[in-house]
Structure formats: structure tokens, C-alpha cells
Image (tube, coloured by chain):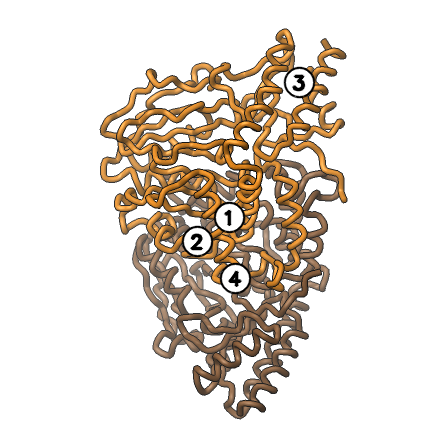
Chain colours: A orange, B brown
């Protein structure tokens, strides 16, 4: 077998080896079916079982009530940036958005095409190195909803708990931390997430949608952009990304088998702690970008004292089998994305590598 | 290896075994990369090479000039039904649509949300069993474009040549016959196609877009629905369906290696002829649905004298390893979808089976 390296990519990102192995084993033909998952009809009994089991596992993992539909759509979070306001901003046509980075800004840009956006808080002044505190939020009590980005891949910040929005529906772009821990779904109107970081390959977007919000959508919306279409047809109005949903199903099963989201969270916290503790104990050789109480345990962002040293580390790391450590082009520095599927051993090895690098280049 | 059966599904549909084998072999890690195609960044050099080679092969196969962009989007043809009129119906806000079946009707429905639709011809009166003739088309010389569906999966009809639209841009939903033969792309404004019949897995839509039409799109459109976004960012504004594009690349290479689209077309015609000739020589035991000069060589639709016999044949065929022969729920009867990847041997075996069935149940 081809040797696998440590993949710190921010997304598409690493998947569990068990998942890849099962997908590989059955890629020519699903057991007892005689056709590949890439070839079967989305209206077949086989695929029905796959999508239903996937939804059942997600529902169980996140303890989702029957008030919510679980959808698998296309177009990524980027299309949700438009679908959310087009559907649920009316009739008020105003909404609160919390600006914690590049992805929040893209969501805001699309919402402004639909109605008024109140930026309830922003950490842009400090290069998005922190999550706004509850008391900073200037919420509009007449808003249609409150939108936030639960984890910010580029800056390495993450909401430790969701903001309090009172009676307003919370809408969350959870693309980069979905399924990393339990969340109280009952506090949310909509949670949406591109699959390609914590759940599967790119090309499928999971949307957890509270069904009482369906009544806000106008019949005049394009059929494919109306959540009613997808809830009524159970994600099968048109052909969904069948392979993507199949992989999400395998990932969900992998989390169930390991003991669920509490177990997942513990492991995630432990991995992040390893890396942050090392950074904090490096006597300032490595400097974390995010404020301590805003740190993400999905994306760890940090700098060295010079760009030159950063480049050197990235190059040497790549040669040693650590891929994808370069920070996002908009902020520079380094970023280690350590999503659900990233092994603890890989974080330990990175820490040794970084320790070594510091000794040689200190 | 798990035994594979004959897959006559209308889509998602059969893929070349060579393609599945290569994808399977490399699913844990691409050669020399150390990560799965499911895990690599869409901004990596590896994926850049994959998408560029895929575009180059498609460009070569269809002889596409530099006046066109080749895009890989999400949302299926169903989202194109809206994107096309939202982008290129203005400023005239009227367009011609030719109604040859259920998919044309869906396209018309979405176009009507944007502007005026002139149904230039329809074969609905005869259950869409034929393609309208050129002299029947009542084109509006002031239309923004002329839309047609090149192949109609449900009814088993196919345009033998595209309609003549004079100076108006032709827009074609080619989801079910893209890459089955050469077409003169220079006659078209837009060709769009969901991948899941002739090109790859579901979840990716190829759009061949004549760039002079870009100026028609309003800046007020949602970013993800504006073709300018995707042309400017070369299908990488957001994360595309990387795995789907990879498989399309393998399929394109498979066609190149077999000798290109003329070879493909020859093989497709020969397969269809085998089945149609048998149907025509069955003394009316099997009756083709489509008129002879409108017959599809992708989807062969036919009936027996009673529904009971049809059910019997479908059940016995399934037991004998022929899957997916049931006609679409909206028209009944039988349908054999014999896309590019469907082997000639499978058609021969189906003909023997049908011959046998006729003898036993004649």
C-alpha cells in the first residue's frame, strides 16, 4: 500500500483510515448489490438504506429531535450563505451577524443582498484573534435570526459555547467543527456544514433545519433554493451526492463505534492541549495567534519570529512527512488542522518535530 | 472480488470498470502523494493537475475553443434550470424553450420565475414519443436564447442533431448524453450536464459556457449563482466536488484512450441498433415507445402487451442479473439505459434473455 503521510490540511481534510479502507474494499461493488456506490440509483432500496442509516446516526450523535430535518445538499456553505437569508430573513428582512472572520464576512455579504444586516459584534480590529464575549453582542430584538461561525479555520478561533440569542433562532455555519463535540441543537434554527473537514469528502453540505422556519420561505424562490423542496423530498428532489453521503455515513458510524461525541470531544481536547501546551512552553519561540479563551481545537494557528523561519519549518516539516502546515494566504504563519480524524500520534510527532526545530534554530 | 451485475439504471449509472479499478487502487493514497483524493486540498498542486488535465481532455474530446469556459459546479442540472435564466435571460427577459419531456418542463418552470417563456414546440400530446422537427419550431427572434434537452431519459428520445437557432445562443441540458458523440460546441451558448449518467458520480455538474454571455449577469445575483464567479475563479470560488472531478477525469481519459468520441459514438450506435433491431423484429411482442427517427441510443424504452408481462420480465431479468430495467414511474413499461460505459456484451445478453422470454411467454 502507498505510504500515507500526516495531513494537516484545513479542508478537504483527513478522513479516518477505517472509513477509507471500507470505501476502498467496496468500491467495485457494494456487498450483495453487484454495483458500485458510484453507480447505484439514488432511488434504489440500497441507497435508501444508506441515507436513512446516516441520518439516524447523525440524529443519535447530536440528539436531534423530530422538530428538525437533516438534509444533504450541494453547493457548500457558500450556497447556504445565500439560501439562509433568501428563505428565513423574510418577512422582517433584517438579521444579526457576528463577524469572526473571512467566512462570517462572506455570509454577511450574501445576506446584505437580501435585507439589512446588523453586525452584532466583530473582532476584525484584532485580526480576528478572539471570539466576542456575550456582553459585547449588540443584538437587534427585531432580527429574523442571529448568525455565527462556530469555528474559524483561518484564525484558529472557536466559540466555546454558542452565543445566547434569547428567542431569536440561532443560525450556525459549523463547517469546520461539526461533530467535534455535542451541541444543544434545540438552541438552533439552522446548523449547516460543508462535509469536507470533519465529515466526508467535498461536494455535500449537511443542513439541520428546524421545520417551523419553513413557513418563512416564499413560493417565488427558485425551487432548488427553497428549503421546503428539500425537506418535502427528503434531500431527493434531484440526485444528491450519493458517494458523499455514503462516506458521511461511514464517518458517523466510526464516531458511534468509538463511543459517540463525548468521547470524540475528549480526544479532540487532548490533542489540542498537547500542541497548545507545547506552544505556551516554548518561551515565546512559537506564538499562538488566538487569545487563549478563544482557541480552536480544530485549527491551531501560530507564528515564529520571522517569515523566513516559518518557511524553513514548513519546508522541513513537509520533507519529514507533515503536510499542509502553511497558514492561510490571508494571514500567513502556520496552521495545524487537527480535525476529528487526525491521530493523536500525529500531534505528538509534530510536537517532537517542533521541539527539535526550536533546538536547532533557537 | 464482489460479482458485478448488468446495471441498466438511468442514473446514477454504470461507470467503466477500468475507472472504478484505478479509483479503488488509489483510494487510500494517490501515488506519490500519501493522501487520498478524498482528503487533498482543492488548492494543492496535485488537485490543480487533476482538474487541469480533466479540462484539457474534455476540451480535446469536444474540440472546444478558447471562447468557452469549462466549469465544474454543484447542484445538478436542476440548479442550472435556475442559473441559466437568472444569468442570461436579461435584459430581454424572454427565452424559447422546446418541451420534449419532464426535464424540459422543469427547466421551463424555473425560467418562468425569471421572465417570459415561449414554448417553441412540444411533443407532450403524444406522450413525448418524438423530437419536434425543425419546421415545427416557432422561435421568437427576440428571445435571449433557445433551450432544449438533448436526450430524454424517461421517454427514450434524443435529438439526432441540435435545433437550428439562427443567431440565438443554443442552451442545452445534455445531462444524459454528454460525451456520447461529438457535437459542434461552437453552435452553443451553454451546454450543461449532471455527471451521473455518462461522466462520473452524482454531485458535480459540468457547464461549458461561452464567455461572451458573461456580461448579461447582474452583479445583484447571489455570488454562487453568478457564472462570472465561477469563470473568474476557475471553478474554485469555493471547494468543488474534488472526488467527482477526479472520476470525470478518469472517464475522459478512458474515452481518449479508446480513440475519442467518434469511436464512442460508433460503439453507442451499434449497441442501440442491436436492441432496437431485436425489438423491431419481435413481431410486435416488444413495442418501442419512441418514434423511429427520434430514438435515443442512451435510453431504450419499450412496452409489452400487458403490465403483468412487463412485471414478470423485470422480475425474471433481475434474478438473471439485469438490474434497473423498470421504466420511469411516470410512464411505466421498460427502459434499458445503455450509456457509454455499458458493455456491448450486456446488450447482447439482454437480447438473448428477451428472446427467450418471448418464446416462453409468447
Nearer mark to the viewer, of 3 and 4: 4
Do dots 2 and 4 share one subunit? Answer: no
Do dots 2 and 3 share one subunit? Answer: no
Task: Name the N-terminal-most of marks 1 and 2.
Answer: 1
Q: What is the number of the mark on residue A41? A: 4
Where, by quadrant of the figure, is residue A310 drawn?
top right
Which residue lies under the disc numbered 3?
A310
Do dots 3 and 4 share one subunit? Answer: yes
- Vertical relation: A226 (above or below) B136: above
Nearer mark to the viewer, of 1 and 3: 3
Residue A114 x %, y % = 31, 37
Disc 1 and disc 2 in contact, CB within 8 angstroms: yes
Which residue lies under the disc numbered 1?
B73
Disc 1 and disc 3 in contact, CB within 8 angstroms: no
Q: Chain of mark 3?
A: A
Do dots 1 and 2 share one subunit? Answer: yes
In what element is the residue under mark 4?
loop
In what element is the residue under mark 3?
helix
In what element is the residue under mark 2?
helix
Task: Name the N-terminal-most of marks 3 and 4.
Answer: 4
Q: Quadrant of the N terminus of chain B?
A: bottom right
Residue B360 x %, y % = 57, 90
Amino acid at each position: 500500500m502507498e505510504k500515507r503521510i500526516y495531513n494537516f490540511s484545513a479542508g478537504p481534510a483527513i478522513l479516518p483510515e477505517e472509513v477509507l479502507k471500507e470505501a476502498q474494499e467496496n468500491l467495485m461493488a457494494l456487498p450483495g448489490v453487484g454495483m458500485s456506490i458510484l453507480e447505484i440509483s439514488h432511488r434504489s432500496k440500497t441507497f435508501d438504506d444508506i441515507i436513512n442509516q446516516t441520518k439516524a446516526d447523525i440524529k443519535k450523535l447530536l440528539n436531534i429531535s423530530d422538530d428538525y430535518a437533516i438534509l444533504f445538499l450541494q453547493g457548500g456553505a457558500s450556497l447556504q450563505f445565500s439560501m439562509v437569508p433568501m428563505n428565513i430573513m423574510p418577512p422582517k428582512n433584517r438579521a444579526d451577524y457576528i463577524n469572526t472572520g473571512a467566512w462570517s464576512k462572506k455570509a454577511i455579504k450574501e445576506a446584505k443582498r437580501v435585507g439589512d444586516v446588523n453586525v452584532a459584534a466583530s473582532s476584525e480590529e484584532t485580526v480576528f484573534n478572539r471570539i466576542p464575549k456575550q456582553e459585547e453582542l449588540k443584538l437587534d430584538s427585531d432580527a429574523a435570526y442571529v448568525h455565527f461561525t462556530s469555528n474559524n479555520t483561518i484564525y484558529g478561533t472557536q466559540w466555546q459555547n454558542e452565543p445566547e440569542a434569547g428567542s431569536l433562532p440561532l443560525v450556525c455555519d459549523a463547517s469546520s467543527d461539526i461533530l467535534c463535540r455535542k451541541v444543544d441543537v434545540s438552541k438552533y434554527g439552522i446548523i449547516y456544514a460543508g462535509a469536507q473537514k470533519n465529515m466526508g469528502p467535498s461536494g455535500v453540505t449537511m443542513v439541520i433545519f428546524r421545520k417551523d422556519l419553513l413557513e418563512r420561505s416564499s413560493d417565488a424562490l427558485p425551487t432548488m433554493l427553497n428549503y421546503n423542496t428539500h425537506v418535502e423530498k427528503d434531500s431527493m428532489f434531484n440526485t444528491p451526492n450519493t458517494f458523499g453521503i455514503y462516506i458521511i455515513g461511514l464517518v458517523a458510524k466510526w464516531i458511534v463505534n468509538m463511543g459517540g461525541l463525548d468521547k470524540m470531544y475528549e480526544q479532540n481536547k487532548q490533542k489540542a492541549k498537547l500542541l497548545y501546551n507545547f506552544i505556551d512552553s516554548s518561551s515565546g519561540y512559537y506564538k499562538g495567534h488566538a487569545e487563549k479563551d478563544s482557541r480552536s481545537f480544530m485549527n491551531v494557528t501560530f507564528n515564529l519570529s520571522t517569515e523566513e523561519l516559518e518557511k524553513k519549518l514548513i519546508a522541513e516539516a513537509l520533507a519529514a512527512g507533515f503536510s499542509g502546515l502553511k497558514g492561510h494566504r490571508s494571514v500567513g504563519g502556520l496552521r495545524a488542522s487537527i480535525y476529528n480524524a487526525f491521530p493523536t500520534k500525529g500531534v505528538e510527532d509534530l510536537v517532537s518535530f517542533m521541539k527539535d526545530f526550536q533546538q536547532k534554530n533557537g
